[in-house]
Amino acid sequence: MNKAFRDTAGGIAIAIALLAAGYFLGTFHTHPLTKAADFPAWVQAIGSIVAIFAAIGISYTQQRNAIKRESRKVIDENLYTVKSIRDELAVLSEGFELHVGKEIRSLKRGDILLIEWNPAERPFVVYEACASQLGKIDDDRLRKNIIYAFAQARGLVLSIRTNTRLIERLDAAQASPIVPGDERRQQSIDVCEDGLKSYAMRIKLAYARAKATEIEFNAAVGSYLERNAVE
């Protein structure tokens, strides 16, 4: 039973009750209780009115409880989505810290991030599965934080993969045979090293932005979970 139907049915029931009450009150006014023989009929009439209002009260309570249950169901689904996304980002963050976090933080201009690491091909399985649910989260700040946090994480993953490919090219150049008088080998090595030095600073900046976004994301998630906790 949808909300529109319940509202319409409730309105009709109230209207009927008011009409019935008006009818009995009008009848009482035009035909007041003057004989003892009329007493049972009026008791029955008043009882009918009370029964109608009681039925309306029960219907209203049931309707209100049904709306609350539906609302709570949506909130619980959103909480599940938010918690799942939070946990996935936490696991990704731990993975970065374990494999490259310390090395990225210690990078200085002119350094090369000499770590070959290939993150999972699909590191955002939960986020992708829950993407259709994001629009149902009734918190603009949180939705934006979720999207921005995963955009930053995705960019960092791609940067690490690209850095790994560049290192592989450098390794291949350094492993190539030395040919006397042929400068192409050294030129290839120099190009790879210059690219890696430049890319290292980009990775460090992307890492710093991702960590700052993660802090904002966790704060928004904590606020949302606290606000929608089961009372």
Image (spheres, helix red, strand yellow):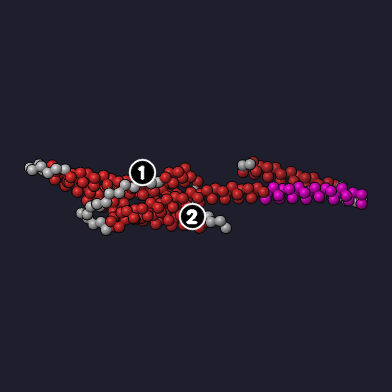
Spot the residue most to the left.
Answer: 181
Task: Determine if the magenta segment contains residue 44.
Answer: yes
Mark whose residue sits in front, 2 or 1: 1
Vertical arrangement, residue 223 with respect to residue 164, above or below: below
Q: What residue type is labelled 2?
A: Tyr
Residue position marked by numbered label 2 in the rendering: 224
Q: Quadrant of the N terminus?
A: top right
Q: Which residue is drawn at 13% across and 45% down?
A: 186
Q: Tell me which numbered mark, 2 or 1, is placed earlier along the sequence.
A: 1
> In the shown orientation, is residue 172 left or right of residue 24?
left
Residue 159: numbered disc: none
Residue 49 horizontal/vertical position (percent): 78, 48
**Would you name the residue on which mark 1 appears?**
121
Residue located at (60% from left, 49% from top): 69
Q: Quadrant of residue 23?
A: top right
User: Is residue 97 inside the magenta stretch?
Assistant: no
Stretch of the chain drawn in magenta: 36-61
